[in-house]
Every structure is written in C-alpha cells, then in structure tokens.
Amino acid sequence: MKFIANTSLSTKLIVTFMFLGVLPLAVIGWRLKVAATKIEQTTADVMEERAAHLLDKIDRNVFERYGDVQAFASNAVIHDKDSWYQAGADKNKIVAAANKYASLYGIYKLSILVDTTGKVIAVNDRDATGKPIETGWIYQKNFKDAAWFKEAMAGNFLKSTILDGTYVQDVYFDDEVKRVYGGDGMVIGFSAPMRDEDGNVIGVWNNRADFAFVEEMIVDTYKSMKADGVVTAEFSLVDREGRFLVDYDPSGLKKETLERDTATLLRRTIMEEGTDGARDLIAGHNGTSRVLDTEHGHWQTAGYASSKGALGYPGLKWGLFIRGNEEEVLAAQTSTTHEFVWLLGITSVTLAIASWLLGRSLSKPILRGMAAMKDVGQQVAAASQQVSSASQSLAQGASEQASSLEETSSALEEITSMTRKNAETAQQASALAAQAKDAGDKGNLAMAKMGQAIGEIEKSASETAKIIKVIDEIAFQTNLLALNAAVEAARAGEAGKGFAVVAEEVRNLAMRSAEAAKTTSAMIEQSVQSARNGVAISGDVGKMLGEITLNVTRVNALVGEIAAASNEQSQGITQINNSVSQMDKVTQSNAAGAEETAAASEELSAQAAEMASTVRELISIVSGAVQTPAARDGRDDSELRRPPVAATRQPQASRPRAATKAESAIPFGDDQKNSFSDFNG
C-alpha cells in the first residue's frame, strides 16, 4: 500500500490503461482460440457437405440415364421388324434412331438392341459427334449369356418404391466399347426390356454410357474449390466394395485434366490405402477425418459421404472422399490468428505510449492548479469581509414589497370588471346554442331518411350484382356447351346424336339468361327511384345544415369576445402572480440573508483550513511524494490554517424578522464551490 501511495499519477494511469486494454484482448484471444477449434470442425463439415452434394449431383445424372433407356426402348421404330438385324442406318430405322440418341445426349458410346434370344437387332454406327464408327461386327455376336441381358429379361431391376424397369450395371471396362473407340472402355450400363403393343417383351435395349460424364462433374467441383483457395483438393470415388472408380489428385499431376490409371481403378480398394474413415464410408456413413498424406508429408482435412440416391433413384452405394491440405483449408483461420497476435502487440505498445502521454498531460496541469489553490485559500479568508454587504439589500427589499402590493390591488379591480362582462356574453351564447341544437336535430332527422334511402339503393345494387353474376355463369357454361356442340358436330355420323343434347342445353341456358336479364332490369329501375329519393332528402339536409352554420357563426363571434375577456383576465392574474412571487422572493432573501450574514465569517474560516488540507492530499496523489504546497515554497502550513479577519455583523435589530428553521438550512459556500469549478475548468 505504501508503494501505491508513493507512485505517481502517470505510473498509475499507465498500469490501469494497460490492464483495461490488454485484458479484453486476452479474453478475445482465448475466445479466438476456441473459435479456431470450431472453425476446424466446421471446415471439415464443409468438405463432407461438398462430398454429399457432389454425390447427389452424380445420382441425379444417373437417374436421368435410368429413364433414358426406358424411353429409347419405347420408341415406335422398334416395331418395324423389317429393319431388324440389318446393319446401317440406311437399311435399319432403329440404327438411325440410335444414332440420333447418341448425338442428342452425347454420353452414350454404344446402344445395342437384341431380341429375346440375344441376337443383335440394331446398334448405332455413329458416335456423339456424328462421326461414323465401325460396329458391323457386333451383329455377329449373341448376348444371351451377357449379365445385363439375363438380368433385364429376368426383371432384376435396380428399383425403389417409385422407380422400376431398368437394370443398372455398375462401372466396368467394356470390350465392345474398347474395340470401337479404343481406350479403356470404362462405362456404366443401362438395360431395359422392349415390349410390343400387347406388353410382351420382344427384346432388350442396352445403353453404355461413357463414365467421363461422372469424371467431368468431379473436375468441375475441383475447379470450384480451387477458386475458393483449396488447390490441393483430392477426390476418391469408390464403388460399394470400396474399389476405386476415380482417384484424382490434380495438384500432384500439376494439371486439372483427369487421367485414368487402369492399374488402380476397379482393382485396388480404399481399405488398402489405410485411409481413416474408409470403413465408415464403405458402411454407408458420412463423416470427417484428419488424414496424414505420407507422400507429401502434411496433414489433410477430409470429408466423406455415401450415395443415398436422388429423386427416387436408389443409387449404386458409391462413396466419395474429398481431402485438402490442412494448412490450405484453414488458411483463413490461420491468417486471422496471426493478425490478432500482431494486433495484440501493437495495441499494447500503443496503450503504453498513450497512457504515459496522458498521465503527463494530466498531472502537470493538476500540480499547477494545486499551487494556485494555495493562494486562493488565503483570498477566501479576506472574502468574508464582503459578506456584510448582504444586509444592505434588506432595506431595498422592504420598498419593493410596498410597490408590489399596490400593483396587486389595481389588478384585482380589472379582474372584477372582466368577470362581469364574461357573464353577460355567456348568456347570449347559451341562447344561440339552443337554436343551433334545434337545427341540428332537424338535420339529424333528414340524415336518417337519407341513410334509409341509400340503404335501399345498396340493397338493390347487391341484388343486381348477384343477377349479373348468374348471367356471367350462364354465359360461361353456354360457351362451353357451344364448344362441345361444335366438336360433336365435327365428328358427324353416329356421334352427331350428341349435338342434339348439347343444343337442348344451350336453349335452356338462353332462357335462364333472358329471365335473369328481366330481373336485372327491374332491379335497376328500383335503384334509380331510390337514388332520386336520396337526392331530394339530401336537399333538405343541406338547408338544415345552412341554418346550423349561420347560428354557429354567431356563437363563434360571441365565443371570441369571451376569449378576449378571458385573455385579459389571464394577464391580470399573471401580473398578480408575478407580484406575489416577487414579494415572496424578497422576503425569503431578507430572512436568509440576515441569518447567513451572522455565520458567514466562521464558515469561511473553516473552509479555508479544509481547503489547505485538501491541497496537500491532492499533491501527494499526483506527484506520488508526501508534501504540501507550503513545504514546496519553504513556508509552514500554519499560514494556510490562519483564521481570516472576522466580518462585521449587522446588528440583530436591523433584521426584519428571525429566519425559519428551513430557511437557515440553506447550504453556505456555493460561491466558493463555483470559484473552484471555474479554476479547475
């Protein structure tokens, strides 16, 4: 405690500001660390959501392929059996249709149609760009032992509660596609039965979609993540057994194109990689994990998701793993942490400098003020001599009281005259108000009649609206029946009998329309008559209201006179109040002044001593060293405690009356307080 007492104000301010400034930043830093942990988990969740979103997009596209093969198999051209088994679009209309589908959809490598024995009916001979391809040799094959043919014929479809009719063959390397196009022949197969008009199966339509349409969606997702700053993203798409369908690491390949590694795809499984979370993925779960990339030597944030299907399509139970360099994924959070550390350091230095400057700027003026207050204490003692002048105001207050009483008497006489005039005017206003009341009653009666007439008009209008609505409905139905009659007439023959029925209905509706129109006419006439009555009654109301207006005008004039008289009364009363208030103030001032004058000298002397003690304490607080203003000047503090010269008191006989207890309780020393405030300011 002694150390704190001897510490200067500047040092105290620096310590206080540093504590108040750095402590909140430290709390924010702790909260930032907690938030960083949450951000890491949230970032992993985003990777999981990306995987789930991409899988959903893939399933939606596969769902469309699911329906394509059924649509192709229902094409009427398959019933042209004269074209069956012939190669070339010029001889086989089914081949022409298959070529059109290949060009239109752009993803089907081969569309093969076989009969119920597995013999080839037709196969496209052009690719998606319209370029001819060699498929004639396929007509020599028989697909009765092919898995897709057996499953489609047996009705073993990939189905859900709302989808059925298509067998989906999971990703595989197709020999026919490889021979026709070259490459690895990686496709997804879609097969659906073809049926005749009686619903009997007459063959199977098989589409082999290029797996590139799935790979393109993965590449597009990588480009989107790259735009967000995740350049090291890696993608692993696996089938239900965990075999790789896509293993895409563009940052390692240093190019965005996706190249297939046939030594890995459909051969190695994600379980063999030892990836954390692989078991959950194969089990059909979604989640996040932290994976060590042994090849590049850094940790990765990973999110994985399992296919749940889309739009009723149940999916092939694929799984997708998306990984990204942890430092890159969390770059924004790391940058924020570094920025905060810099901010904390800069803020601490700034607070220290600002506190030191502020302490010096505050302590110097205070010390100068303390020295000045020492002299003020001596001047306060001398100021007690001036208190005696307060007694001189007592005599002047007595004369002001007499003058105020005379003004009060004159004002009372004026108020009496104004009151008499207001009474006469009020009687005339009462008579006119009675006449205005009679005219108002007549006006109210006329208005009641007019309201009744308007009510009748409203009722008639309402009925008219209902009739018009009936007519509209009849007209609408008549139009429909007329249209039906035209259709029936166009059919002719035996169907022409229906026209007679429609015509009869049209005539009935026409009769209803005529009856409704007649009713509408009567209602309108009634509405017109009611309107005339309303106009006549409105004229009467206008006359009555004219009389009311005239009387109200006269009443208004009289009220104006009353208002003028009341205004004069108000002015008189105000003058009385001012006079009484002035008398009260003078009386209170005289009484308080008499008591305060008696105690002024003693109060001022005590305050001078107290102020000297306060000055010593303030200097000790500011400078941090125990000293007094007198000690700094080489003088004894007794000079500040010396009592002032007593003020000369006014004799008691000169006071008009003794002050009451409440008046004597008025605080003394406001003048001194104001002078200290001015000095400090």
Image (cartoon, grey):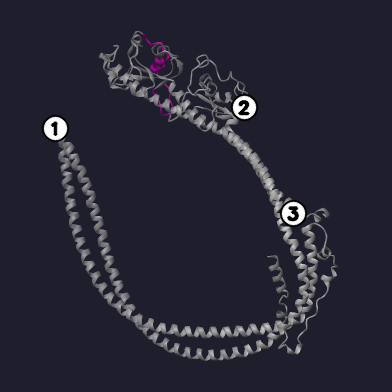
Q: Main secondary structure of the magenta part?
A: loop
For badge 3, the amino acid type reads Ser
Compared to residue 50, the image places residue 239 above or below, namely above
- Sequence order check: which comes first, mark 3 or mark 1? 3
* Residue at 53 percent of width and 16 percent of height: 264
Q: Are marks 1 and 2 in contact (CB under 8 Å)?
A: no
Q: Distance between the residues labelled 1 and 2?
A: 84 Å
Count neighbours of disc 3 (C-alpha within 10 A) and say few if under 14, some if 14 to 19, many if 20 or more. Answer: many
Residue pointed to by mark 1: 493
Count neighbours of disc 2 (C-alpha within 10 A) and say few if under 14, some if 14 to 19, many if 20 or more. Answer: some
Residue pointed to by mark 2: 299
Q: Residue furthest front?
A: 633
Choose between 409 and 18: the one closer to the eye.
18
Choose between 639 and 84: the one closer to the eye.
639
For badge 1, the amino acid type reads Gly
Q: Which of marks 1 and 2 is in front?
A: 2
Q: How far apart are marks 2 and 3 (CA)?
A: 51 Å
Asked if the stretch drawn in magenta spans residue 525, the answer is no
In the picture, measured across the screen, residue 60 lies left or right of residue 522, that is right
Compared to residue 594, the image places residue 292 above or below, namely above
The C terminus lies in quadrant: bottom right
Residue 373 location (% of width, % of height):
76, 67
Q: Name which quarter of the figure residue 2 lies in.
A: bottom right
Compared to residue 366, the image places residue 644 above or below, namely below
- Sequence order check: which comes first, mark 2 or mark 3? 3
Region of the chain picked out in magenta, as a range = 141-165
